[in-house]
Amino acid sequence: MEVRFLGHACFELSDGDTTVLIDPFLTGNPKAAISAEDAAATAILLTHGHGDHIGDTVAIAKRTGAPVVAIVELAGELAGEGVDVRDPNLGGTVKFDWGSVKLVPAWHTSTTPKGTVNTPAGLVIHFGETVVYHLGDTCVFSDMALVGKRTPIDVALMCIGGHYTMDRADAVDAAELIGAKTVIPCHYNTFPQIETDAEAFKSDVESATRSDVVVLEPGESHSA
Ligand code: NI
Ligand code: MN
């Protein structure tokens, strides 16, 4: 399975047959690796409804017919726009032919650009034999350890930019709590407020934990 970083918090998981798109903020994203028109999706997964995560969800879902998994209030807004949704809440799991996605806590706030208040989540994604944990936007919190204890994580997609989320120093603690084989940083350098040094994060995590950090430029992929 390939994990492709599309910029900011947007990732594509693909085995060449199934394509799972997460937080497809492409239009207006200065770091977007592709355009919304070129995005493929078998399913779209959302961590929360802030504009830099919901992004082009409606347009891509309508064009591809992909179902969208989002927490119930956010799913309700999307259903009202004619999108096929799955609407779990925290702790809930949605199953697909290709695997599943479970919503886990994230400490953050969220209101959509249209005004729907929604609780942010992290996503634990089983894609075939590979487990990916997209933390969403969050500060560090000790219950992250429960996620990795319950389900050993192959790849953690982790915000490190600070200001709107945890910064790279707190993210080292998050990496330690989760214990993923591989950590891929995201949600940094998109805007001036979230500039940070991903290579310093890599060296800090790799000296403090057993996780490997893979820093991807937008458009680059990691095989997991
Ligand atoms: Ni956010
Ligand atoms: Mn964000």
Image (cartoon, rainbow, N blue to C red):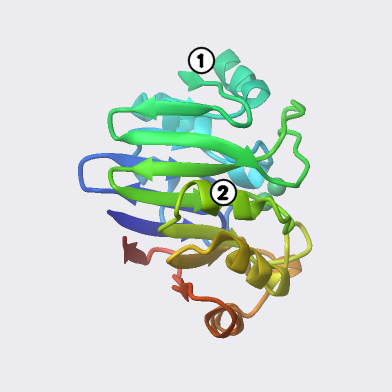
Which mark is first along the chain, 2 or 1?
1
- Picture quarter containing residue 205? bottom right
Residue 224 drawn at (x, y percent): 31, 60
Quarter of the image with the N terminus in it: bottom left
- Please name the amino acid that badge 1 sits on: Gly
Q: Secondary structure at mark 2?
A: helix
Q: Which mark is residue 147?
A: 2
Q: Residue furthest front?
A: 149
Q: Residue at x 59, y 66 (%)?
A: 175
Query: Measured along the vertical axis of the image, is residue 44 above or below residue 8?
Result: above
Quickly name the residue at label 1. 82
Residue at screen point 55% across, 16% down? 79
Q: Relative to residue 67, is residue 80 drawn left or right?
A: right
Does the image show residue 73?
Answer: yes
Q: Quadrant of residue 164?
A: bottom right
Q: Which mark is residue 128?
A: none
Label 2 Cα crowd, 10 Å radius (few <14 / some 14-19 / many 20+): some
| Mark 1 residue crowding within 10 angstroms, few (<14) / some (14–19) / many (20+) | few
